[in-house]
Amino acid sequence: MSEAVRTTCPYCGVGCGVLARAGEPVEGDRAHPANFGRLCSKGTALGETLSLDGRLLHPEIDGKRATWEAALDRVASRFAATIAEHGSDSVALYVSGQLLTEDYYAANKFAKGFLGTGNIDSNSRLCMASAVAGHTTAFGEDLVPGIYADLELADLVVLVGSNLAWCHPVLYQRLLAAREARPQMRLVVIDPRRTASCDDDTLHLPLAPGTDVALFGGLLRYLWEGGFADRTFLAEHLSGVDEALAAAIAPVEVAACCGLDPDDVAAFFALFAGTRKVVTLFSQGVNQSSAGTDKVNAILNVHLLTGRIGQPGCGPLSITGQPNAMGGREVGALASMLAGHLEWGRPGDAALLREFWQAPRLATGPGAKAVDLFRAVGDGRIRAIWIIATNPAVSMPDSVAIRAALADCDFVAVSDCVRDSDTADLAHVRLPALGWGEKDGTVTNSERVISRQRAFLEAPGEARPDWWAVAQVAARMGFASAFAWTGPADIFREHARLSGTGNTGARRFDISALATLSDAEYGNLPPTRWPCAAGVPAVDRLFGDGRFPTSDGRARLRPTGYRPPENAVSPKWPLVLLTGRVRDQWHTMTRTGKTPRLLSHVPEPTLAVHPDDAAGLADGTLAIVASAWGEAVLRVRHDPGMRQGCVFVPMHWTDRFCPAGRINPAVNPARDPLSGQPELKHTPVRIAPWHSDWHGFLLTRRRLGSDLAPWCAVLPSTAGVWRHELAGQGDAAAAFARLRPLLSEADGSWIVLSDAAGGLHRAALLRDGRLEGCLFIGPDHALPPRDWLVSLFALDALVPDVRRTLLAGRPADRATVDPWICVCHSVTAGSIRRVIAAGCDSVTAVGAATRAGTNCGSCKPEIGALLRLARPLVA
Ligand code: SF4
């Protein structure tokens, strides 16, 4: 067996180390400081997502295969012509936290340095731009003070707007292990939903969406009035305390403002005040808001006031959603930033960068942030755009408007490893990019650790690195000498050199110690935390010395008065829509949607709704969610953990998987005034049953498309089977007649059952005794479970007994759906219930009996929920 390549998981901002070999399952890297060998369900399944189906393998112009020369010429000539006619700000790049730092650096240098526009923004704008703005205003620079180990050292961990168990599972596993070792450690979860991150010992504060500023403002006043401020730290290291206190609401008003039980608020305040080692971890639930920056500052304020920062087990900790959102921040690939933590507004910074890059046309100011950037595309101010490694036609709020803007844009280039995405379908030029496993460069995780992503697969077709494509276009536009890199190591060294240029310690982002790495040293670079300035001892945590990179060296408490979300609920739109992730999917499913294992957890787009808000909406039926901007149709899931008045919808589904289930057309485009981050966690909506006359499903050996019915969700299943879930209006018999011929292109023997009066129609096609496909249609969603039928496709021939029960949809001895809980070991809820009933009374005991939860551990919260449900029975 070949030696494993040390690389990094391409999904979330935890940045786990991975050992990978071509054609083998991946393993966690025990030597990596983020995960010490752990991987979550998504990371564990990485090896299953590497097939070339759906890959873009050659450049295309207007949908036809083209040479790289022709495609690069077209991009360069269209950008040059657009700038010549309409000026530098008529062009833009929209990039991604999926990019490696070297790709990011190249794109930012090209746009800001040589096209002369600030119009380069990243999909990280949707993820953590509010954290950037909050850190910068409080600390003077975008700096995450703490490290992951602080979660294990803390006595109190506060999760705000973070379903850590599902969205950053390995960090959650580290937290769980620390709590098992030190049961006195407390966990507070602040989230409108009771998520998988809550257990019996959690204090859960289900606050009203958007009220975090009031909660932390009230806490600030409570800490001050109760004498819990660190007066010495305050006197020596802080400014703005009086203004922040004046802006905060009174503690006594918090419960009413946030819709919380006053006892819970009092308990949280007392816990925070009485615990020295507190980590407040925050994520997208905080950032994705029209008050996102205020929320971040409100959290930072309480840590600063109490001096709980920069010490082991203490501090605010922002966790990014994407694998290299931090790298993008380092190279300044957001419209509001310059490279190397230089700033537009700081005297001398732009001149330093102009000189360093030898870029006389350096942009003169910030460009348009994501929402405004696509508005500028829509109204013709931006006429040429290059989109790299992201899918804004799905992921942006009000995404119907984004599609329309791109469809009307004079020139759209898309670099991606996927050929067909909702965005790539609108491109004039498609450039084939390398995927994970083929790329070579670096990423930075949420604790400032730079790790290598190394290639362990050959580049397929004509796919090339993104930095190379940028450099080639730049060269064609006359800037060859500034982009004459021979590989990613050249770019990294330039990036590292810039971080130390003119930097006598004022900029904490300094990796100049890495500026002289040889190619071999770069190749072997171990995980390295910054800052790592040449000649300066390394530190893990920032601000332990109380020095901040502001003009006076003091951190600033920023006043954050509570203001309600921009778009309020009303009688017409009475519920608040929150969007987010599910455990086993990633972004728009271009990779995780390839593996049946991961899709088995949540196979369709769902609407989680509190049972008391679900009048007329039975569990499992379809419902329409409508807002002032758009609508989606989703499978209803009753969830008593939802705060009443709120609904939750995952954001992953696209045209390829379920066109009607795309939620972002309904999401409001409000954004934070400072960070520009869209409000993905607060859209006023209404919900209603979606009228359908029939429901059905179709199982086949090939993918038939996602447009077979007015509502259609398509997903791969095991045994090479494609599952198509369907619903529609009109005559069920007519739908059956239309869909049945899709089962097979050739002849076979049919088994058919039709009960027109009952609206039941079922058919199965067998060829040489082997199941080729089946179609089930009924008047409601109460159809047979799919897993048994899917399993029959693996058989060479169906025995007579099976044929007899085939159209019943289940063997005679089985009557209920049994969903998988542990996708790593294929353990179902039924199996887990059985061992619980037999006496297993802990997650560990269930694991020992079934293996569930013993690989990645992502399903441990769900095993815990089954234990809690069963507790009265086994007590
Ligand atoms: Fe990848 Fe999971 Fe680690 Fe995130 S927690 S980096 S998705 S393995």
Image (spheres, rainbow, N blue to C red):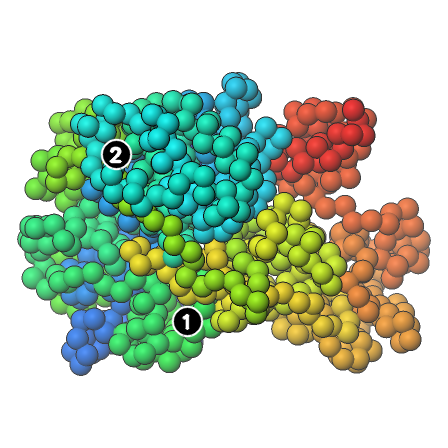
Front residue of 469 and 337: 337
Q: Quadrant of residue 79?
A: bottom left
**Viewer-side residue, 296 vs 733:** 296
In this rendering, the answer to whether 482 lies above or below 821 is below
Out of 802 and 841, give the one closest to the viewer.
841
Question: In the rendered image, which residue does mark 2 sit on?
Answer: 530
Q: Position of residue 650 (x, y in %)?
A: 55, 55
Tell me what residue is drawn at x 32 percent, y 78 percent: 379
> Do labels 2 and 1 touch, CB within 8 Å?
no
Q: Which mark is residue 402?
A: 1
Q: Height in image: 111 above or below 551?
A: below
Residue at 39% over, 33% down: 222
Q: Where residue 164 sits: x, y (%)? A: 50, 39
> Is residue 269 visible in the rendered structure shown here?
yes
Percent x, y of residue 439: 36, 49
Work out whether 468 lies above or below 859. below
Q: Quadrant of the C terminus?
A: top right
In this rendering, would 351 be left or right of 714? left
Tag 2 secondary structure: loop
Instruction: Give the residue type at disc 2.
Output: Trp
Q: Is residue 62 visible?
A: no
